[in-house]
Image (cartoon, coloured by chain):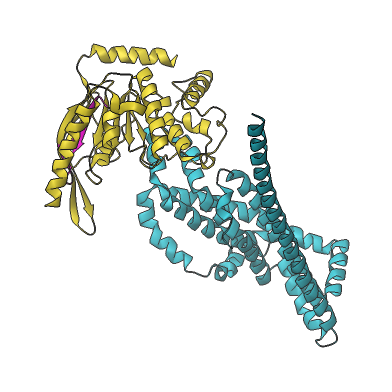
Amino acid sequence: MSSVETITQTRAETASGDNPVIRVETVSKLFRTPGEGAIRALQEISLTIRYGEFVTVVGPSGCGKSTLIKLIAGFSPPSSGRILFQGDEVRGLNTRVGYVPQESKLFPWLTVEENVGFGLDSKRFSRPERERQVSQFIKLAGLAGFEKYYPAQLSGGMSKRASIMRALAYEPPVILMDEPFGPLDAQTRMVLQDELLKIWEQKRQTIVFVTHDLVEAVALADRVVVMTHRPGKIKDIIDVPMARPRNIFEIHRQEGFDEAYGRLWNIFRHELKLRSH
Amino acid sequence: MSKDVSQEHSEIGSAQDQDDVVLKREAGFNLRGLRITLLRFGIVGGFLLLWQIASGRWIEPFLISSPSRIFASLITGFQSGDLLQHTWVTFTEIAIGFPAGAITGIALGYWFGRSRVLAEIFEPIIIALNGIPRTALAPLFIVWLGIGIWSKVGVVFLLTFFLNFFNTYTGMRQMDQEYVDLARLMRVRGLKLTFRVILPAISPYVFTGIRTSIPFSVIGAIVGEFIAATEGVGFFIRLSAGIFRTADVFVGIIVLMFMVIIMDRIAGMVEKRVLRWQTQSEHVGVQG
């Protein structure tokens, strides 16, 4: 059964002690653009992410935070430096991560159920296992009753949920999320943040979550990676020692939030001042 | 308490009223649709009537024939079995050439789309070949394949192939690469990647290719039959025109028209079924 597999996997991970799941070593990334010539999107980024951690990456738009997780996913290679994933250097697509893109990017020609089950390999999951897994994750996302719907028939929030479930369902050890809640309205956002935390508290997969929203960054994370504007560098990494489970809807009242948010805001205020000069 | 209930009722009542208004508006829309249909039939009927009156009175019948004569020829043509045989021959040419051309075009378009090297080598060559007016090649097919059905199958194939190839290839180039990346990230490869991701992603383009190539496949068959043939609707039209049996020329044209309409309807039905995941609402309200 798949849950057994996950447990053995987790045990193997804890056995390996402090071994990080992702290790970004002095990675830079250059882009060639027709107008401005070469753009340095990332400059000598070094970052270590441990198993089971919820890390958010926050920074102003255009700071290269999306580029960073795209490199971890192996969509393109770094210009210099290297990325180790479970000890192996990432070369080509990293099929050990799940990826939730900015727009939902559900396959529009597949139903909700087919989308969620898309990554469930027939070698790893037998048909009944697959069906169980899909219906479990559909229920988890509150999409029961919508299994046969096509993405075009879903609301923005629903397709977002389905998109996240598609990445979670096949249980990759790491999930990369690229501003997944960006285009949603404030209420839907909070509901989805809450759901994501609940699911994560059950499954404890490693999550790297990119956002430009400071509250979201603090509310979800164990650690917040703060990036600066182009060329993207890591300015600071803030620990968020808030207790879990967290109540997203009253996150402001939770102990430790103000302190972490204050530190984050100080860094950003500094950034803003620098740029207004 | 009872006051609350009555208030609730009145609210429901007002919502009901609004729904009624909406329904009435939609009914009005249907009435409009009916008017348009009637108008359309009126125009076509008026044209046929004018044609019937003009024929023999103002214009020589051997030039334009007349609806009644054409209808009579259509009946006798099918009764004698002659026309049926010609139709069957043309249909066979299309039934072989069209699917073969479409499948080859789609497959090659897909293959070129997947392989950058192949595309880089062949793209200019194919564009150059596309510059040739393809019906000009029809006489060559007669030389190569004789005056039987195979030369016409060849022309049908050629015309269908290019349209399907270009549409599929365009689809491959326009396709959102992120779908493929996402699928590959989920370890999806090979046949599953092709049939569950790439082909569905480009299917709107593929169907555009198929549907635009339908009338061209019929053109291919007819052009082939015009040049050299002993059977087929194209042969029948040319023969009839040669002996001034104008009504029969129109009969041939009507047969071809229905051939295209039927093929297009079938393709349209398949398209609707395959692309049912697309929102229909996109097509609403374009023409105010």
Chain part drawn in magenta: A221-234
Q: Residue furthest bottom?
A: B58
Relative placement, left or right, of A208 versus A167 is: left
Q: Which of A215 and B219 is in front in this view?
A: A215
Instruction: Pick the quarter of the image with the N terminus of chain B.
Output: top right
Q: Where is residue A99 in the image (x, y as percent from the top left)?
A: 35, 33
Q: Can residue A178 be seen in this view?
A: yes
Relative placement, left or right, of A155 versus A99 is: right
Q: Chain B is drawn in which colour?
A: cyan
Relative placement, left or right, of B31 versus A264 is: right
Relative placement, left or right, of A124 versus A233 is: right
Q: Chain A is drawn in which colour?
A: yellow
Residue occupying image coordinates x 30% and y 18%: A244
Instruction: Pick the quarter of the image with the C terminus of chain B.
Output: bottom right
Residue occupying image coordinates x 36% and y 24%: A197
Question: With respect to residue B229, does B116 lie above or below?
Answer: above
Residue occupying image coordinates x 68% and y 62%: B148
Question: With respect to residue A236, does A171 lie above or below?
Answer: above
